[in-house]
Image (spheres, grey):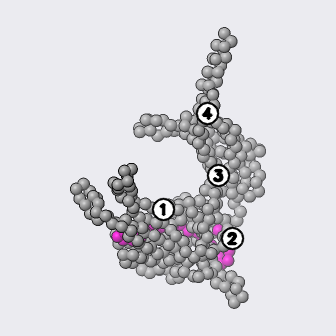
Amino acid sequence: MKRFVLLTVVLTVGIVTADTARFSVLVLDEKEVFPIPNVTVRANFSEDIGWRAWTESPKPYVVIEKTDKTGYCCIKGKTNCGRVACWIPQPPEGYYSGGGWGYRFKKRNFFGVWQPDNLVVTLRLDRVVKPIPLFVKRVELTNFRKGIGGFDGTNSVVRFDLMKGDWLAPYGKGETADLEFKSTLVIKDKAWFMMEPRKYDWVYFYNLGTTAKCLNSDDGFAVVKPNLHAGIKIRCADMPFKTRELSLINIGRKKKYHRNGEDWSCENYKDNYSDRVISFRIRSRYDEKGNLKEAYYGKIYGDFEIQGDEKRGITSISFLYYLNPTSLDRNLEWDMKTNLCPEPGVINPPREP
């Protein structure tokens, strides 16, 4: 009888706790490293719905908690696949949005509780320090029919004025070229290939590489790899700007061999630098003693989006940049309200990424 009762209790506990995942969250101020109380934390516990995914979308098990006076909160939910994520949907006053975490549990204990069950997740929030108005612009240049930059079958060049926010002629009214975008096409091979059923044609295997170059010899770039969940990725341009030329996206086509090592097909590729963050310095001038007397600082989030092919070269360029128009002021913390650019393009949402 006692064994039966014990077995019943064990089975009941197992049913109740099955697929349970739990962890704790600690929210800290990034700079001062003190806990932040009363912060809302949202957690999603994923569900694998198997064949039903063909007809419906899985709905996560959602848990919302608030941190206590010590900055902690406990999160517990259900997931049958072990995937969980948590973040801060609305930052407290004086902080940027940010802080995120994802994890995949891989094993469960006897009672079906995902292990480990004592994880402590630290989410850090960046403080709003000294936001200022900035020149913020979404740049886009497109001509899918003919390409841009005067493509001659090998190279093409376009130039951009960052202070005016416009391309140089013939694409705009820019006056001083701060950046030069140059593409170089390399044809690596060609082959007779069936492009359509019963229709063969020459297919070219190529690489279309693009660079961005600061034309002033004293200007430069700095590539930053910050925390992807940071509220503000570049607050101040306090890094050295030693690189005048950056390699951007490579676009191309190559052979993709099958398992037998003989048959192949065509595969298009495109490098992805979407997580790269770039800071830059332009219009740099020094006095006779070698002291920097003029320079303007900015940043580019999400890198450059470039499209093109082997026939037209570059067909479009797009990027988002922030510029402080005050000489020698390295502050790049935008107030997200005042844009000094009269024609900023599409900036959505208007916030620090």
Q: Do the residues labelled 3 and 4 touch (CB within 8 Å)?
A: no
In this rendering, the label closer to the viewer, 1 or 3: 1
Q: For this rendering, which residue is in front, 16 or 129?
A: 16
Checking the image for residue 271, the label placed there is: 1
Sequence-wise, which precedes: disc 1 or disc 2? 2
Q: Do the residues labelled 2 and 3 touch (CB within 8 Å)?
A: no
Label 4 sits on residue = 108
In this rendering, the label closer to the viewer, 4 or 2: 4
Q: Which amino acid does label 1 sit on?
A: Asp
Q: What residue type is labelled 3?
A: Gly
Q: Do the residues labelled 1 and 4 touch (CB within 8 Å)?
A: no
Q: For this rendering, which residue is in front, 50 or 145?
A: 50
Q: How far apart are marks 2 and 3 (CA)?
A: 24 Å
Classify mark 3: residues with Cα within 10 Å, few (<14), some (14-19) or many (20+): many
> Residue drawn 76% across and 54% down?
33
Checking the image for residue 238, the label placed there is: 2
Classify mark 1: residues with Cα within 10 Å, few (<14), some (14-19) or many (20+): few
> Residue drawn 62% across and 25% down?
14
Element on which disc 4 rests = strand
Q: Does the magenta stretch include residue 262?
A: no
Q: Which amino acid does label 4 sit on?
A: Arg
Q: How far apart are marks 1 and 4 (CA)?
A: 38 Å
Q: Distance between the residues labelled 3 and 4?
A: 27 Å
Which quadrant would residue 22 be assigned to in this image? top right
Name the image quarter holding the N terminus.
top right
Classify mark 4: residues with Cα within 10 Å, few (<14), some (14-19) or many (20+): some
Q: Give the range drawn in magenta.
A: 306-333
Label 3 sits on residue = 99
> Residue drawn 39% across and 68% down?
188
How far across and down, in percent of the image, does residue 157 sit? 44, 77
Q: Distance between the residues labelled 1 and 3?
A: 27 Å
Q: Would residue 324 be seen by someone viewing this image from the given angle? A: yes
